[in-house]
Amino acid sequence: MLSKMKYYLTFIFSLIGIFPLLADEIAPIEIILEGEASDKKLEMSGLAWYRDNLILMPQYVDLKSPAFYYVKKSELKNWVRKKEKNSIDPKRIELKMPNFDKMIDGYQGFEALCFHGDKIYLIIESKENNFMRSFLIMGTINFKKSMIDLSQSKLNEIPIPINLKNIGYESILKHNSNLYLFFEANGADITQNAYALKYSMSLDYKGKVPLQNIEYRLTDVSRADSRGSFWGINFFWPGERSLLKPNRENIMNKLKRGEAHQRFDHVEQLLNFKIGKNGISRTELPPIQLELNKESRNSEGLVMLDNLGFLMVVDEYPRTIFSFLPYKLLLKIETKPF
């Protein structure tokens, strides 16, 4: 009975604009980037808030002059509110780091980040002899000096659950003084026992946390709120059908597809999750489907911009795209039983 009530509440609130209708799709609004951060070769691979500053993390930094980039939240909120949309030029944060490309065979750059105080946590990916590896590291940020220091980082290798082409740990979030790391492929026909990995803030391994199966790729997650609720990017490129083996009972078959999702085979949507006592599972909030183009967009960074919506970034396919996704979330709905 309670589940039905929540469904009807979702439908009613959609009519007054709090939720989009189940089959509605939302069009991302591109925020044009200027300067270094717009370079496609950097392959933007992560977003995270440090205080009131949005940090943009490239996968491949310029080794001669390594840097991450930032935009102030106030600048982003002003951009959202103005009718005239100007371009944004993210500022540099210098990066002090060892030669990871020499320390790690097959080094493939940064894949995820989050912050806790002045500590920064990152995931590094590598591929050697067709075998994928992921590493967790910790550093510090001194924003006044515009510096991120990874020079003393120790490599903590993350055990890969299954070796799949170009798939590793792509998401990291902090909740209740713990870090949760998410593998990119968690479909029912890939693994019956999907899980996230749990670490302390000092990078001590604390075990596996059961994770509800998620079809397609999980390419990034937002910050978790105080209740453990967060959003994740769910992406599918049809060329990976044989790799990801999407199960017929996946979430897209349980809901009405939006107009573009009916016309195209690729999937771009956000899913809502919650960390519970028995594991991590999807909530009863419907997926937020993005309006699709003919070309799929591989978004690899996601944050919430207060209650205004989401900010997302596409790495290089089809190009670097930084965008705002308008979506207001006012009603809290509890998670389904795990």
Image (spheres, rainbow, N blue to C red):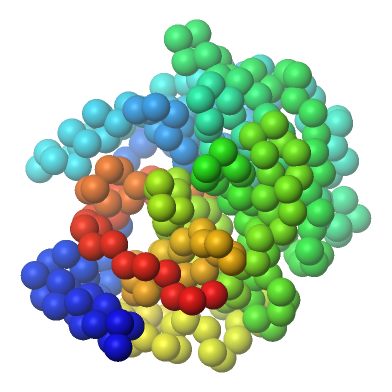
91 relative position to 41: left or right = left
Q: Which residue is found at the position 81% from the left and 54% from the top?
A: 159
Question: From where the camera sits, is residue 307 visible?
Answer: yes
The residue lying toward the viewer, choosing from 235 and 52, is: 52
108 relative position to 302: left or right = right
Q: Which residue is found at the position 68% from the left and 70% from the top?
A: 194
Looking at the image, which residue sits at the far top? 145
Vertical order, 6 against 41 (above or below): below
Q: Which residue is found at the position 52% from the left and 69% from the top?
A: 281
Looking at the image, which residue sits at the far right? 129
Count of marks placed on residues: 0
Vertical order, 166 against 306 (above or below): below
Quarter residue 87 falls in: top left
Q: Quadrant of the N terminus?
A: bottom left
- Residue 184: x percent and y percent? 64, 61
- Residue 123: x percent and y percent? 67, 42
Quarter residue 25 falls in: bottom left
- Residue 156: x percent and y percent? 80, 38
Question: From where the camera sits, is residue 297 visible?
Answer: no
The residue lying toward the viewer, choosing from 100 and 183, is: 183
The residue lying toward the viewer, choosing from 260 and 311, is: 311
164 relative position to 92: left or right = right
- Residue 175: x percent and y percent? 52, 45
Quarter residue 3 falls in: bottom left
Vertical order, 255 against 43 (above or below): below
Q: Which residue is found at the position 47% from the left and 21% from the top?
A: 92
327 relative position to 43: left or right = left
Vertical order, 262 against 229 (above or below): below
Q: Quadrant of the C terminus?
A: bottom right
